[in-house]
Image (cartoon, rainbow, N blue to C red):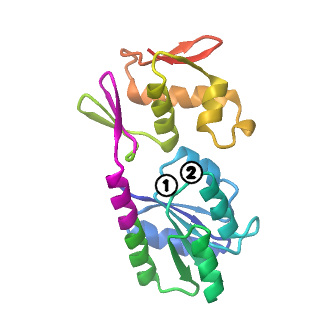
Amino acid sequence: MKEHILVVDDDNDILELLEYNLTNAGYDVLGFLNTKHVRQVLSEESIDLIIMDRNLPDIEGSLYIEMLRSKNINTPVIFLSAKDSAEDIKDGFLRGADDYITKPFNLEEFILRIKAVLKRSSKGSAQSAHSMKYRDIVLDLNQHKVKIDTQEIDLTKLETALLKIMISNKGRVLDRDFLLKNIWTDSQNIHQKTVNVAIKRLKEKIDPTRKKEYIKTIRGVGYLLA
């Protein structure tokens, strides 16, 4: 399974260079020129590594990572920045970096350091790996995968979080407000219809034939893992 890297750099040439070379190195890459959609992506997708510039148009990159860390978002981060003084590098690590690479950079070394951070991260995940079970569903919380009987299903980070909270509250009707507040990081700006769409997609993945009816819709109220 490919590892997913999210890159934020306001220099379009550097962004395209990184997207091209990281894709060729075997990674799935999402590139952004600013941080506008980063929180949404982190809430909905399984991201293994963030590569973050510091000189961004909307916010200083290390401040943004510090904010993510304060929200318990612990995705590994490599700063890629022209800020290259000893104090800058120290500041980057203190605000949540797992590694710090200064511009200009050697591409081969850069990819080796990415591999090293991902390797350390995967070892940490393996040590804390655990799963949840419900009926014939086995949910791997680290891999964001479900096994139903012998069939393996890939889930997004958002779908994993939804299934996890429903298994944790099996037998209890969960209303849309509860799901919004506990799953979406920016729940005040998310419409309740977003919950409906997310649940529908989850149901289509875990019960494509609609025979098992794991998740029941309680009209006017919410959803029940029966």
Q: Please state the horizontal and vertical placement of residue 66, each as a whole percent of the image.
A: 64, 63
- Residue at horizontal 37 percent and vertical 58 percent from the top: 124
Residue behind mark 1:
47
How busy is the neighbourhood of tag 1: few (under 14 within 10 Å), some, or many (20 plus)? many
Sequence-earlier tag: 1 or 2: 2
- Residue at horizontal 51 percent and vertical 47 percent from the top: 45
- Note whether residue 26 is visible: no
Kind of residue indicated by mark 1: Ile
Kindly identify which numbered label has been placed on residue 42. Answer: 2
Query: Is 143 rendered above or below residue 201?
Result: below
Query: Is 211 rendered above or below residue 190?
Result: above
- Note whether residue 107 is visible: yes
Q: Please state the horizontal and vertical placement of residue 16, each as a whole percent of the image.
A: 56, 71
Q: Please state the horizontal and vertical placement of residue 213, each as a whole percent of the image.
A: 41, 15
Kindly identify which numbered label has been placed on residue 92. Answer: none
Q: Quadrant of residue 25?
A: bottom left
Q: In which quarter of the image is residue 222?
A: top right
Kind of residue indicated by mark 2: Leu
Report the number of discs: 2
Q: Please state the horizontal and vertical placement of residue 196, each as a whole percent of the image.
A: 60, 25
Q: Which of 142 and 29 is in front in this view?
A: 142
Looking at the rendered structure, the secondary structure element under dot 2 is helix
* Residue 38 as seen in the image, left or right of residue 213: right
Does residue 129 show up magenta in the picture?
A: yes
Q: Which residues, given as a range, are shown in magenta?
A: 119-141
Residue lying farthest to the left in this orientation: 150
Looking at the rendered structure, the secondary structure element under dot 1 is loop
**Cβ–Cβ under 8 Å for marks 1 and 2:** yes
Does residue 135 show up magenta in the picture?
A: yes
